[in-house]
Image (cartoon, rainbow, N blue to C red):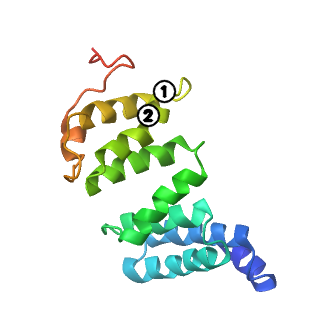
Amino acid sequence: MAAADRALAIDPTAKGALKQKRLALFAAADKAEDERAAYAKADQAVAALNRLEPDHPYGLIYTIQGHIARGEIPPQPARNGLVRAAKQAPFDLGLALQVGQLLPSEGAVAAAIGALQPVAANPHGEALSRQAKRMIAFLQGKPEGVPVSFAAFYAEGPETAPDGAPQG
């Protein structure tokens, strides 16, 4: 973090330094005596990054991750930011998977399946692809407009093979 602070002292708009400072502050927040204050300090780095680049996927992702790390339900602007980040970074399969998990909690089952389909179809995705296929199978048949929790999904147990058949 010291290097990031030195870089920011020279150029307060150094985006790379803000990203590194955010990473260091969030890592330290988990171990801090006063986690809430430590996360608030980390949020300042995220806010500075978002002011410089309001539509950059990193800032949008960091915003929602901060809420999740604190065990909070992310507010709607943070949730919208995650969806926007996924649209800006369609190559990021992990981000698409996060969106596919977020949208059903808002009752957007069809949109979640749509976000998960490219991940499921990726021939190089292996674990993410299998996870997306399982998530799609879990969501199919769930009513649109009714919030869906993934708690039962994660409690289901065995992972499925890529063809959807239970393993071992």
Q: Is residue 114 visible?
A: yes
Q: Is residue 130 left or right of residue 122?
A: left
Image location of residue 118, percent across then percent down: 49, 34
Q: Circle 2 sits on which residue?
A: 117
Residue 21 vs 37, above or below: the answer is above
Q: Is residue 65 visible?
A: no
**Amino acid, disc 2:** Gln
Q: Is residue 21 left or right of residue 143?
A: right
Q: Which mark is residue 121?
A: 1
Residue 9 vs 136, above or below: the answer is below
Tell me where residue 11 sits by quadrant.
bottom right
| 98 and 16: which is toward the camera | 98
Residue at image location 53% in from the left, 28% down from the top: 122
Q: Locate the N terminus and report the quarter of the image it occupies.
A: bottom right
Residue at image location 32% in from the left, 19% down from the top: 164
Q: CA distance from mark 2 to mark 1?
A: 6 Å
Residue at image location 25% in from the left, 26% down from the top: 158
Q: Is residue 101 left or right of residue 26?
A: left
| 64 and 139: which is toward the camera | 139
